Image (tube, rainbow, N blue to C red):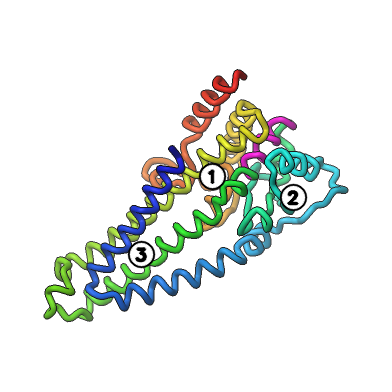
């Protein structure tokens, strides 16, 4: 069901891109904006792992690691039939973790010093299995495609906004330009990026549900993951992370706090929903 939902949401993003392209009345600007977005996200796809790991001052560890994290990831990677990813520790007291990398052969998982302190071994296994699930499900690729389309929509919307304000479109050709005039263009320029952001966030939430389920299958301990999520949520509330909103979707628990309308733009599902699903999965597994 999560994969179907992701497919539908991706189709929605694509449809939104087509609609706003029609609104501005030509294919030239749409092609240029889409091309720029592809280049930007191609660079992000190839180098985002290095960028984000450097951003959080992550330090790579090896088999000699004394925390036990490397050996745990190595064991879980074998259970998941995945190549061994690089393993990093982030010097930060906020408990959290994320996975990055363009594919399973070029993947990395990172955990903060805070998460190593507050979780027991089974809970940490659940968290790292969740991160390996993102690698196996190729969620980074999915999020990159979603970001490409959403970025193109935003760029085209900006073009439409400025063109509408300064009369940049020739409205003489009614067949080619079938928008709603200047007001229609301005409305689309405001609504389209907002809609794209909401859809992109919904895709991210869907992938979190899938990673919870896949990760539980890898480690066989859905209740340990549920317990870890609760601990991490409380830990982030007590000690929020100074994280970039652009990287918030990477973390297992949203490092940014907010309520009310902010939940609409959250990159993560509600914790209650995640825990309820994990508890239901545990019952199915006879645990």
Give the CA distance from mark 3 to mark 2. Answer: 37 Å
Q: Marks 3 and 1, Cα distance to the nearest angstrom?
A: 25 Å
Going from N to C along the chain, the mark reached first, 1 or 2, is 2
Quadrant where the N terminus sits is top left
Nearer-N-terminus badge (3/1):
3
**Image coordinates for residue 157, horizontal then vertical, percent:** 31, 67
Location of residue 72 with respect to 44 vertically, above or below: above
- Assign a secondary structure to mark 2: loop
Instruction: State the residue position of label 1.
Output: 254
Q: Which residues are magenta?
A: 121-131
Judged by its main secondary structure, the magenta piece is: helix
Q: Is residue 200 left or right of residue 178?
A: right
Q: CA distance from mark 1 to mark 2?
A: 26 Å
* Label 2 crowd (10 A; few <14 / some 14-19 / many >=20): many
Q: Label 1, secondary structure: give it.
A: loop
Question: Pointer 2: what residue?
Answer: 84
- Between 173 and 251, which is closer to the camera in this rendering? 173
Q: Is residue 231 magenta?
A: no
Position of 6 relative to 277 (above/below): below
Give me the disc on residue 101.
none
Q: Which mark is residue 153?
A: 3
Q: Would residue 186 appear left or right of 226 to someone viewing this image?
A: left
> Does the rendering let one see residue 119?
yes
Question: 10 Å neighbourhood of mark 1: few (<14), some, or many (≥20)?
Answer: many
Whether pointer 3 and pointer 1 mark residues with C-beta atoms closer than 8 Å, the reply is no
**Mark 3 surroundings within 10 Å by alpha-carbon count, few (fewer than 14), some (14 through 19), many (20 or more):** many
Q: Position of residue 133 (x, y in %)?
A: 61, 43
**Which residue is painted at 59% across and 29% down in the image?**
226
Q: Are the residues flagged by discs 1 and 2 in contact, CB closer than 8 Å?
A: no
- Badge nearest the viewer, 3 or 2: 2
From this view, report whether residue 100 is shown above or below residue 126: below
């Amino acid at each position: 069901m999560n994969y179907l939902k992701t497919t539908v949401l991706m189709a929605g993003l694509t449809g939104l891109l087509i609609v706003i392209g029609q609104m501005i009345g030509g294919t030239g600007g749409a092609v240029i904006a889409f091309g720029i977005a592809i280049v930007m996200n191609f660079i992000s796809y190839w180098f985002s792992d290095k960028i984000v790991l450097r951003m959080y001052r992550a330090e790579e560890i090896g088999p000699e690691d004394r925390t036990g994290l490397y050996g745990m990831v190595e064991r879980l990677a074998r259970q998941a039939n995945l190549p061994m990813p690089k393993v990093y520790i982030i010097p930060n007291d906020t408990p959290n973790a994320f996975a990055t990398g363009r594919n399973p052969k070029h993947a990395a998982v990172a955990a903060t010093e805070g998460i190593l302190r507050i979780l027991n071994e089974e809970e940490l296994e659940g968290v790292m299995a969740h991160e390996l699930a993102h690698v196996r499900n190729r969620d980074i690729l999915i999020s990159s495609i979603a970001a490409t389309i959403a970025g193109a929509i935003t760029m085209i919307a900006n073009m439409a906004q400025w063109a509408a304000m300064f009369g940049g479109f020739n409205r003489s050709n009614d067949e080619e330009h079938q928008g709603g005039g200047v007001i229609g263009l301005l409305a689309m320029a405001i609504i389209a990026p907002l809609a794209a952001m909401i859809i992109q966030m919904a895709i991210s939430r869907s992938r979190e549900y899938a990673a919870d389920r896949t990760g539980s299958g890898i480690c066989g301990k859905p209740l340990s993951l549920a317990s870890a999520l609760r601990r991490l949520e409380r830990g982030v509330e007590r000690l929020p992370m100074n994280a970039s909103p652009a990287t918030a979707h990477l973390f297992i628990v949203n490092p940014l706090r907010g309520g009310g309308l902010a939940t609409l733009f959250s990159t993560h599902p509600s914790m209650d929903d995640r825990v309820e699903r994990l508890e239901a999965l545990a019952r199915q597994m006879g645990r």
